[in-house]
Image: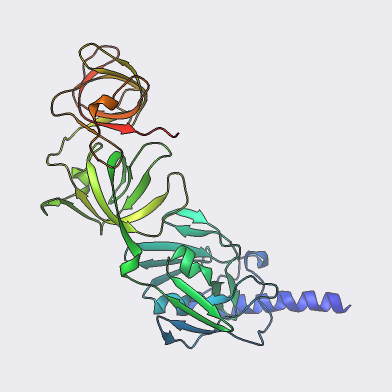
């Protein structure tokens, strides 16, 4: 009988929270959502954890779940103190957080956290407690790439604006555009390299500071990217870029590319490359004619001796847009990336 009463009280507690209204950010929670869509409310915590954000104490406190591996912290109080803007979605019980080049999504009851459009897990799901959404303390370090320190029942979190950006240089293999947004793949093709997610706030420029636009970029350009430290552990990993600087002295509009293996080095020095076209208009097999101005580089854009262009070498060739109608087609290569082989 006692067991039945306890279960009934637990369900009543969850239902009360759903009917009360503000589950997060003072936004109403839809009562039509099934009970099992929300994590049950934790029992009262006898020893709350005090929290400091960037050295300043906040009013809200955290807690340790029974048998928990790390303390839970109030999402809104902590992230707003770090300068994030939050948007609550009552239909999905999810919160979107944005600050500069950092964007993530937290969904109630799901141990999946969005980093640059990819998902990661922390081992603990966010949960509603007394109409507030809590996340594990490691959310700040592993998702926001800040710092977290716990001593006794005190938690200290911080986020350095200077520490969240790094530089990466590489040759663009593909650009997939969606309106103002795009995914720019550098330092390799397929699963190699990294993907730079860019948006309307991303700055594009030449090395001498001339302003460019997303539409000016194309495959084969070597760029230096300023991007977030936060990187989704996907293949290839993804991150958000705030600035792209084109290092080439000239643009080559209409360039296409093929990633593959050199099957033959012909007497005239041209290369037969077989692999995969990087766009719908690029052939899987192409003959690349090399000229004096053809750049031969590694995936980071550093010069490589042309002696590396031998049969069996893995390369990404950039050429066109004009191609012969022969099979395979022939194009003039303006840049060839030599992809190192793993030993």
- The front one of 291 and 283 is 291
**How many marks do you count on the picture?**
0
Task: State whether residue 38 is above or below residue 62.
Answer: above
- The front one of 239 and 289 is 289
**Residue at 32% across, 70% down:** 161
* Colour approach in the figure: rainbow
Q: Is residue 285 left or right of residue 131?
A: left
The residue furthest right is 1
Q: Position of residue 115 (x, y in %)?
A: 44, 58
- The front one of 323 and 168 is 168
Is residue 22 visible in this depiction of the protein? no
**Residue at 42% across, 48% down:** 237
Q: Position of residue 82 (x, y in %)?
A: 39, 76
**Residue at 59% across, 75% down:** 71
Task: State whether residue 168 is above or below residue 157.
Answer: above
**Residue at 47% across, 67% down:** 141
Hey, which quadrant is residue 304 in on the image? top left
Q: Is residue 211 left or right of residue 188?
A: left
Q: Position of residue 134 (x, y in %)?
A: 55, 74
Location of the N terminus (image quadrant): bottom right
Is residue 298 visible in this depiction of the protein? yes
Q: Is residue 97 left or right of residue 264?
A: right
Q: Is residue 98 left or right of residue 15?
A: left
Location of the C terminus (image quadrant): top left
Q: Position of residue 152 (x, y in %)?
A: 59, 83
Hey, which quadrant is residue 37 in on the image? bottom right
């Amino acid at each position: 009988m006692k067991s039945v009463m306890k279960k009934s009280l637990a369900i009543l507690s969850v239902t009360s929270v759903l009917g009360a209204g503000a589950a997060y950010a003072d936004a109403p929670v839809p009562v039509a959502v099934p009970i099992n869509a929300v994590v049950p409310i934790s029992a009262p915590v006898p020893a709350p954890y005090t929290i400091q954000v960037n050295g300043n104490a906040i009013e809200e406190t955290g807690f340790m779940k029974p048998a928990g591996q790390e303390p839970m912290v109030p999402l809104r109080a902590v992230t707003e103190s770090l300068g994030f803007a939050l948007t609550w979605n009552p239909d999905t019980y999810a919160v979107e957080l944005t600050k500069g080049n950092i964007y993530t999504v937290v969904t109630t009851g799901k141990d999946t956290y969005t980093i640059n459009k990819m998902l990661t897990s922390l081992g603990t799901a966010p949960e509603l407690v007394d109409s507030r959404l809590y996340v594990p303390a490691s959310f700040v370090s592993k998702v926001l790439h800040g710092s977290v320190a716990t001593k006794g029942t005190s938690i200290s979190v911080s986020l350095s604006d200077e520490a969240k950006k790094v530089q990466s240089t590489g040759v663009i293999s593909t650009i997939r555009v969606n309106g103002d947004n795009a995914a720019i793949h550098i330092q390799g093709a397929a699963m190699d390299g990294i993907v730079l997610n860019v948006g309307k706030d991303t700055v594009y420029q030449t090395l001498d500071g001339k302003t460019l636009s997303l539409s000016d970029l194309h495959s084969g350009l070597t760029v230096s990217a300023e991007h977030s430290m936060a990187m989704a552990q996907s293949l290839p990993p993804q991150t958000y870029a705030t600035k792209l600087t084109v290092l080439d002295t000239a643009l080559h509009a209409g360039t296409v590319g093929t990633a593959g293996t050199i099957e033959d080095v012909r007497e005239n020095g041209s290369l037969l490359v077989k692999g995969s076209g990087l766009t719908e208009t690029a052939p899987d097999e192409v003959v690349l004619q090399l000229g004096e101005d053809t750049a031969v580089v590694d995936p980071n854009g550093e010069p490589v001796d042309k002696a590396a262009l031998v049969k069996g070498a893995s390369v990404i060739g950039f050429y066109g847009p004009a191609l012969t109608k022969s099979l395979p087609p022939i194009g003039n290569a303006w840049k060839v990336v030599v992809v190192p082989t793993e030993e």
